Image: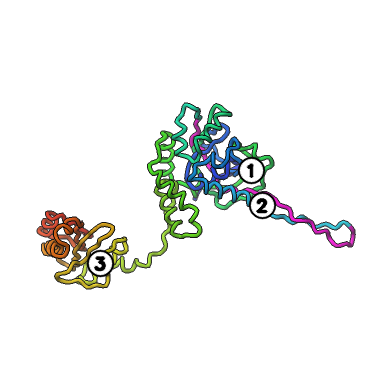
Amino acid sequence: MSESILIYNALCLPAPDIEALIQGRMIAAMPRKLLNNGQKFAFYPLDYLTNQLSIEQYYHPNFLATAQSALTQLNSQDILLQPKQISLLQNEEQLQLPLLSHKTVSIKAWARCEHCQILDKTKPLDILSKLTIWTPEAFEAILQKQPHIFLAYLRVYNVPEFCEVAAHPNIEEKLGKFVGLANIGVSEANPVLNDRTFAQRKRQLEKLEPSLHPELEKLQSAIASLRISQPAAKQLDDDIKAFLGWSSNQPTNPLDLDLPWIQKIAEVGNSSDGHTFEKLVRRGLLKLGFTGSGLNPDATGGAGGMDFYAEQPYPIVGECKATKTEKVTDGTPAQLLKIGMNHLRKVQYENSIKLIVAAGELNFYALRTATENQIDLSTNKP
C-alpha cells in the first residue's frame, strides 16, 4: 500500500498544459523559478496563457482541440449557491435572494519534480517544441521578456478523488508560481506513466531526441475528439498513446466470447479428430484477421483438398495435422507441396507462405522435407 503524502501548495499552469501532463502527452512544465529535485505539489489550472499569446500561437495545431476542451471545462466549473434567506421585517415573508455563482477549481493531479534545467536562446528550442505541446513562438515570446526558460521534468500522479477548491482572486498573476492549499492527502499509487516509460521519456527530453512517430501523433490528435461517441475510436486512441509512450496503462479488454473454442485448439490438435482441428485452425485464422475463400470454418477438408488458404493480408497456404500419439510423418509436408502446387500453380504457391499446423512434433524426415521446401511450422512442441 502506498504511503500517504500531504500536499500543501499547487503550481499554477494553463489548463491545457495540465491536461497534457495528465494524459502523459508530455512530462514537462515551465515554472517561473528553478524547482528543487523531489519538490512535490498539485496542479492549479488557469485559463490564462503566458505573454497573452493566442491559443493558436501557443500550442501546436494537433493539440488545439484538447487545449480548447480543457479551457472550456475549466470555465464551466461554477457552483450555484443559495444564500441564507433573511426577513427584513418581523413576521413578514422572507426575502428571496438570487443565486450566486461561486467559482471552483478541480485539483486532478500532483507531481514530483525529477529535474529542472535552465534554457536560453542557445538551446535547440525548435527540437524542444517538437517534443512538447508548445510552439517555437511560445518560447520566443517568453525569452523576449526574460533571459531564461525554466523547464521542470515532472513525475505526475493522479489524485484518488478530484478535489474542489475555491478559486483564488487575481490568479492570473500567479502563472508559473505557487498558491497555498489546504492539505490534500495523495499517494504514488496511480502514476500517469510507469517507471520504465517515464525514464525513456525523460532521457528523450534531456537529449532532445526527435519524436520517432510524428504521423501517429497527428493521427491520435485527429481521433481524440471521437473518444466519447465512438468506442472503437477510444480503443484505437488508447492503443496509439500506449505505443507513443504517452500512457503506460494496460487496456482492460472485454471478455472474449471466443475463448472457449480458442482454448480447445491445442486439445483437439492432440487428438485423432483431424476434421475438427482443421475447422478450428481456419476459424482461428479468421479471428486473427485473415480472409480468403479457403477459410470457411464449416467446410470439411479431406484428401485432395487444401486444409486452408488465405489471400489477405498476405497469401498463406497450409496443412493441419492432429496427432494423438505419433509424430507428424513425412507425408504431411509432402501433401502440402503436392496439393499446393496442383491448386495454386507454381508461381502462386511459391509466393505464398507455407505452413504446417500440428500439436505434435515432426519426425526427422518430415522436418527435413519441410525445411528444404521452405515450409514453416506451428506446433506446441520445441
Q: Most prominent secondary structure in the magenta stretch?
A: strand
Between marks 3 and 2, how big is the CA–CA gap?
Answer: 60 Å
Nearer to us in this view, 282 or 270: 282
Nearer to us in this view, 338 or 334: 338
Label 3 packing within 10 angstroms: few (<14), some (14-19), many (20+): few
Q: Earlier in the sequence, mark 3 or mark 1?
A: 1
198 falls in the magenta region = no
Q: Position of residue 89 (x, y in %)?
A: 89, 58
Between marks 2 and 1, how big is the CA–CA gap?
Answer: 19 Å
SS at circle 1? strand
- Residue of label 1: 181
Is residue 329 among what the camera can see?
A: no
SS at circle 3? loop
> Which segment is the magenta one?
89-117
Residue 33 sits in which quadrant? Answer: top right
108 falls in the magenta region = yes
Q: Which residue lies at the image location 51% right of the left edge and 36% below the top edge?
A: 152
Q: Which residue lies at the image location 41% right of the left edge and 33% below the top edge?
A: 207
